[in-house]
Amino acid sequence: MTMNKPIRTIAIFLMALFAALLINATYLQYYAAGRYNDDARNRRVVDAEFSRQRGAILVGRDPVAVSVKTDDLYKYQRSYPKPELYAGVTGYFAYGGAITGVEKSQNDVLSGDDSRLFVNRLIDLLGDKGPQGGDVELTINPKAQKAAYDALTSLPGNVKGSVVALEPSTGKILALVNTPSFNPNKIATHDFAANQKAYDALNADPDKPLLNRAVQMALPPGSTFKLVTASAAISSGKYDASSMVPGGPTYQLPQTSGESGLIDNEGRDCGAKTVKFTQAMENSCNTVFAQLAVQVGADAMQQQAEAFGFNSSWFDDLQGTNGKTSLATSTFPKDMNPPQTGQSGIGQFEVRATPLQMAMVAAGIANQGTVMKPYLVNEVQSADSDTVATTEPEKLSEAVTPATAREVTKLLVATVNDGTASPAAITGIQVAGKTGTAQSGQEDVPPYAWFVSFAPADNAKVAVAVMIESADIPRDDIAGGKWGGPIAKKVMEAVLNQ
Amino acid sequence: MSAISPVRAVQQVTVFRSRRGAELVLVVLALAVGIGAYAAVGLGVDGHVPPDILGYGGWLAGLIIAAHITIRIVAPYADPVLLPVVAALNGLGLAVIHRLDLTRGDTSFASKQLFWMTVGVGLFVATLVFLSDHRALQRFTYTAGLAAVVLLLLPLAPGIGHEVNGARIWIRAGGLSFQPGEVAKVLLVISFAGYLVLHRDALALAGRRVAGVDLPRGRDLGPILAMWLVSLLVLVAQRDLGSGLLFFGLFLVMLYVSTERAGWLVVGGFLFVAGVMATYVLSGSVGFLTHVRNRFDIWLDPMAYYDRTPGSFQLVEGLFGMSWGGLIGRGFGEGRPTRVPYAESDFIMAAIGEELGLTAVMAVILCYGLIVERGLRIALISRDSFGKLMAMGLAVSLALQVFTVIGGVTRLIPLTGLTTPFLSYGGSSLVANWVIVALLLRISDHARRPLPDLSVPDDQDSLNTQVMRLP
């Protein structure tokens, strides 16, 4: 019949068109789907991630971050029951991938994507439930955390500072607080106008409440760095805790002349020529530790500092929105000349340390010289609270020998019993500690007050670092012992009195 | 036909059964799809079966059953598959539009669509009842052509013409808006079919053979050039790329089929390419063509235009939605189809892909494929050239429209504004498509009806043979 041949030809052509539609739809909804789903502009996926029933962040059995059911589009509102106290640990979970802290580092677990929760996800799928996130249990000791925060905020005025406490034998972070803190609920709210306003205000605040000072801020550690210098000096084999060390009221740094190269002790008694090592530590003798550093040499000092964790990164339990660690690397300068080496021995020149780093120095000495890798996440639990994984303590390095650690501990115990660190003394318990008051190096910026300690000295359960960047304290009165000591004491007591 | 010997003709006669029972079974299935989808929408979005399910379901069932009964009475031998497939698509479209209404809260497109479906089915019944023989339409070849051109140009008229999203394809009068292009499509098929039936011999036989291809005579190029110009006019003046291409492609295919000469495809293809190239080259300097150029650029790299105006937000949101739907979809109420602008009309496939998944998208494409296949089959078995060409034209227009809109939404080809037949919200489109189905069924009934018993006695045949043998 006429026309049937071209009709058949057209039929084949149309069939090809429909086949193209089918193939293209398959390509789009199956093969290319992942690419579209991963696009940052894909609100559906972003919103769905934001609407998950996220797991809780727990301290003991108590949640410090939890998802609460809401009636709005996003189904669950992230809520922080003790916002300011734990902000530095939890971080925040806000819309559009604005996630920080443990919320970020444990995002896979909390959102339910972690492969360790696979069995549960399978059950969720079969049971037609949305994916449920797992819980994260922290290493934080709630009493120590509260003691640290209360003590820090009780300082006069607008306190900027941080406290970190570690369990020396494991590296567990028992307390991590910052002031000023912030309220993560205000950033996590689904009221996007309000949360943007809150975030902008926090971001513009000159006191930088969003800065996690415990890990993000590396400052000159001042005299607390003398723990490292003493460790290096004793490791060199020339000294022990009962030795006489070179001292004197002043010390002219090598290759210098005049005021700028002259180190003194701000009036404290450091002997005429030599002084007992214990007395040098008790009185925080700058002349002694500068000379020891010069004696030990730049390379040995650097090795000792790096053995405690300087110049490297070893912590990613706290992360920024980019998924990278929040930890600022603590630095000890390389290739120093003798005068620079002398200054580094008293924690000046270009030495910079985070509070977490200084807590690790104390913890390393407290743990017979072995530095444990610090961590915040103790356990990962399924939505049904079954333990899925427990973090195993990990050795970071052997900073000094047990013998050296013992000698340094003796110096630090003497410093608490008879020296500048006495405000941290606890009745009936041997405490080892050291003060620090570090020059900021800037004319209009007051010195930083530091304090590190651990207790009990012979079998330490807790090591603490306190850093006060600034508070409403007269400049002349700023001293690590007077202001930092009592804070460290309260944190140690909180851990020891359980 | 003259080439077929009487003996072979006798062997070829297929006796079609009416198959109305099969149609009824399929209609019940189609209604289950439509009403089931409506119930699923209520369950998924509101958590309960819609309270008006009985009224709604009854109305939908009433319309389709009425259409079925009409076919039984006035077109008993019509194709049994078309009505059920169309009913399923229309029912699914209504459910999806209702689902979008529920999320938006301030639109009632579904009830309006149900009204337009009622009008469409009414016209379907009227067409079947009053048009007892499709060949009657052949008388209106030039009237239909003129009416189509007038309808096409109507949106350009000041006062009633109305522009939506850059395309001037609407007319608005007394609160009702109308897309005349949809109706023009049907009229054009009738007009083309009538014209080509008359002129196919001249178009087919005269001409020259160049490089193995029969090229037509210059003077026969007149009509195709005219149609090309009308298409370009539609494209340029109304900025409606989809319709322009649809009309041109439709005419080209019908010309090819009626003349059986591939040369027309060569000429048409050349004109098409020339038009596209001219558009692309001129688009930098000629203002109204930037619209077309823009669509093309977006097609090449949609993500780069996501935040721009005019940009690719609609297309990309549709792609995001379909990707998110994946193989089986999010389920009614679990997706975010309202993020796509015009999800109820041009982008209804994106809404289906998001909440019902690739599975449903494929099912819908196959349903369209089935309609086209039935249309082409009707063309193949049709006993008259006019019916053959008309069925062919209607099937091809539907196929091209489906390809253009679904291909555009899924980024197979550049996006052009066309409705998805039977699914999209829109009265003109729905009504026109129901009439198309009525016309196909009418031609089909004619083609499948047993031949009237001419009671030619056997000896009459032998008598003729004897006559032939006389010297």
Image: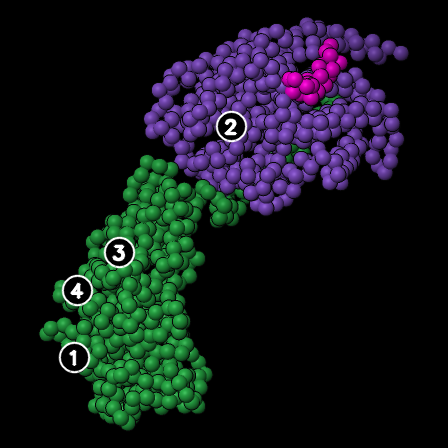
Chain colours: A green, B purple
Q: Which residues are magenta?
A: B138-161
Quadrant of res B234: top right
Determine whether, in the image, residue A444 is placed left or right of residue B269: left
Question: Which chain hosts label 4?
Answer: A
From the viewer's perspective, is residue A418 above or below residue B43? below
Q: Chain of mark 2?
A: B
Name the residue: 40% across, 71% down. A443
* Circle 2 Cα neighbour tier, 10 Å, few/some/many (<14 / 14–19 / ≥20): many
Disc 3 designates what residue? A85
Q: Quadrant of the C terminus of chain A?
A: bottom left
For residue B344, the mark is 2
Q: Looking at the rendering, in which quadrant would you find the N terminus of chain A?
A: top right
Return the residue at label 1: A417
Which residue type carries mark 4? Ala
Query: Residue at 14% of width from left, 72% of height from top?
Result: A426
Q: Chain of mark 3?
A: A
Write down the quadrant of residue A490 in the picture: bottom left
Distance of label 1 from label 2 (alpha carbons) = 80 Å
Residue B279 at x, y percent in the picture: 74, 36
2 vs 4, front mark? 4
Discs 2 and 4 carry the same chain letter: no
